[in-house]
Amino acid sequence: MQEEVELEEKKRFQMPHTYVIIFGIVIVAWLLTFIVPAGKFSTEEVEYETGDGGTETQEVLQQDSFRYMHPLEQDVLHAKLEELSQDEKTLSDLQVDKNDLTQVLDENQKLSLEQLANIGLSEDNLYELYGNSIYDTSENLNKTAQVWGTEDHYGFGVFNYLFEGLVTGDRFSSAIGIVAMLLVVGGAFGIIMKTGAIDAGIYAFLRNAKGMQDLAVPLIFIAFSFMGATFGASEEVIAFAIIIVPFTIALGYDSITAVTITIAAAEIGNAASWMSPFSIAIAQGIAGLPALSGAGFRIVMWIVITLLSCGYTVRYARKIKADPTRSVTYKTDGYFRENLANSSDEGHAFTLGHKLILLELLVGLIWIVYGVMAQGFTIPEMASQFFVIGLGAGIIAMALRVNNMKINDVASAFQEGVADLAPTAAVVGMAQGILLVLGGSDAGSFSALNTILHSVGELLSGVPSMIAAWLMYIFQSLFNLVVTSNSGQAALTMPIMAPLADLAGVSRQVAVLCFQLGAGFVDAFTPVSASLIGVLGIARMDWSQWAKFQVKMQAFLFVIGSAFVIGAVLIGYH
């Protein structure tokens, strides 16, 4: 009988591993670039109000500046540049040295945009001066990655997507910054988990909070939704997840519940936000709207969406608590149940050392939130804060002999914590590889992604207002599957969506609403989201397991989002 059960399990379809899914997406994206020609936009800096009296700038695309990548008309280009070399005023305005230009013309019968860019004459400059006259517009070119290569040797190759993805960005962004922070966070919380303070604290709560456990899930969900709505909590959630995942499982729920009440709740709050500086303020500034305007409608929306989503989560959590084996993560959650069981053998003593470590952790988390909200801390500062928190826990543990820890135990715990999140860090690099294969998310560089963005804008023009608004929402949701940065998505899409809203008879406030709902909800689902992948790594959950649950929740959220978009059009929200 047992053999029959095992055989039946083998026959069942198994969801592919996250690495397999992302690799498949990379290959599909690469094949797409053979079909979709590359295009680009000119860009400009726009200034917008931040809502606190200050101003910021954001580089955005110019809506009517799209052009495809064409072969250069060498004869025409040479003639134009020969004339330019004699126009000292224009050269001065462009900050191009006459001798450099003359030398390039003399040495090269066949010019390239790269050669001209090296002397300060960018493609944007050429297009502004000569338009399409220097191109053979009868042919559109594709920008497709090679099979193998690196940026500095033969050019980027699709099978090097992992390395190139890992080294994209800088210390302030994905992937380098996020990967570094994940490894530091893993090490810091490896120390904290080794002390046993979190397990002891969980059992102390369970002993002393009889009858209140059922309130934990809704209260935590609402708290994280509020964090997402007010300051766009995302990477910060990773720290809290390390505590909440084992806590939620100890209450009888599963890791899916834990991930939902942390990162998913934060992204839902961000989607319905009335004041997020990383989405609403930027999108409204680009759309030419007063900063944080239309807050009344959005506050009501946040309350309704948060309560409905919380109810959805509580309903799921109760079902799992009644029968934990119904969870798709029942087996992987065994790691946390085993840790709690081992702690049980020791009697769950909640010592002074445990209390001091948890107090230090609480103060550290408050410090992180304060730093982000009041001091403008970003990834480098948060990574350092996590390290200090972990180091402080280790010092307390050594001083008070918590779990008999010594200095080498602290170092080993840090090493194990880093190792635990290393696979998650690799996923962040893989996800960035998808963007690289599509040509990147820079509006000012030729890519297939820019052509797709332009084509969608063309399709939406002339559509009836209510349908146009709903299609904008769908587009923003799909676009977020690839570009998860809220500020980046706003910079790429709002310069197109805002004027399109005017043509369709939809207010620009509704266009911003479509952006924030699409960008926020899907952030809780897409495997490209570094914050989501970080939390899943802490929960020891594969993205495919999360997707099985989240697909249904995304459908639920999409229906709610659609209702608010259509309602906003009907009431003339502006």
Image (cartoon, rainbow, N blue to C red):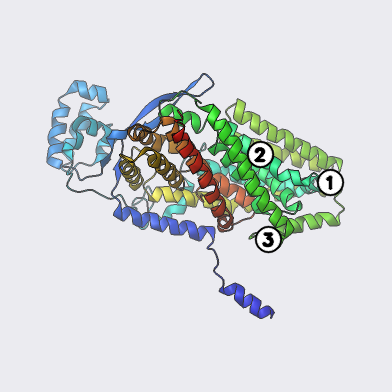
Residue 250 image position (x, y, % from top left): 76, 52
Q: Is residue 60 left or right of residue 253?
A: left
Residue type, numbered disc 3: Tyr
Q: Say which residue appears at 54% left-offset and 69% top-offset.
A: 13
Q: Which residue lies furthest to the top in this view?
A: 53
Residue beneath disc 1: 210
Crowd class of label 1 (few under 14; some 14 to 19; many from 20; radius 10 Å): few
Q: Say which residue appears at 50% left-offset and 31% top-offset.
A: 280
Q: In this view, does 207 lie above or below 134?
A: below
Residue beneath disc 2: 222
Q: Which of 69 and 166 is in front in this view?
A: 69
Residue beneath disc 3: 330
Considering the numbered disc 1 on the image, is that residue within a helix, a strand or a loop?
loop
The answer for how far apart the CA atoms under marks 2 and 1 are is 21 Å
Dividing the picture into quarters, in which one does residue 442 lie? top left
Residue 378 visible to the viewer: no
* Contact? badges 3 and 1 (CB < 8 Å): no
Residue type, numbered disc 1: Lys
Q: Which of 494 and 361 is in front in this view?
A: 494
Q: Say which residue appears at 20% left-offset and 28% top-offset.
A: 99
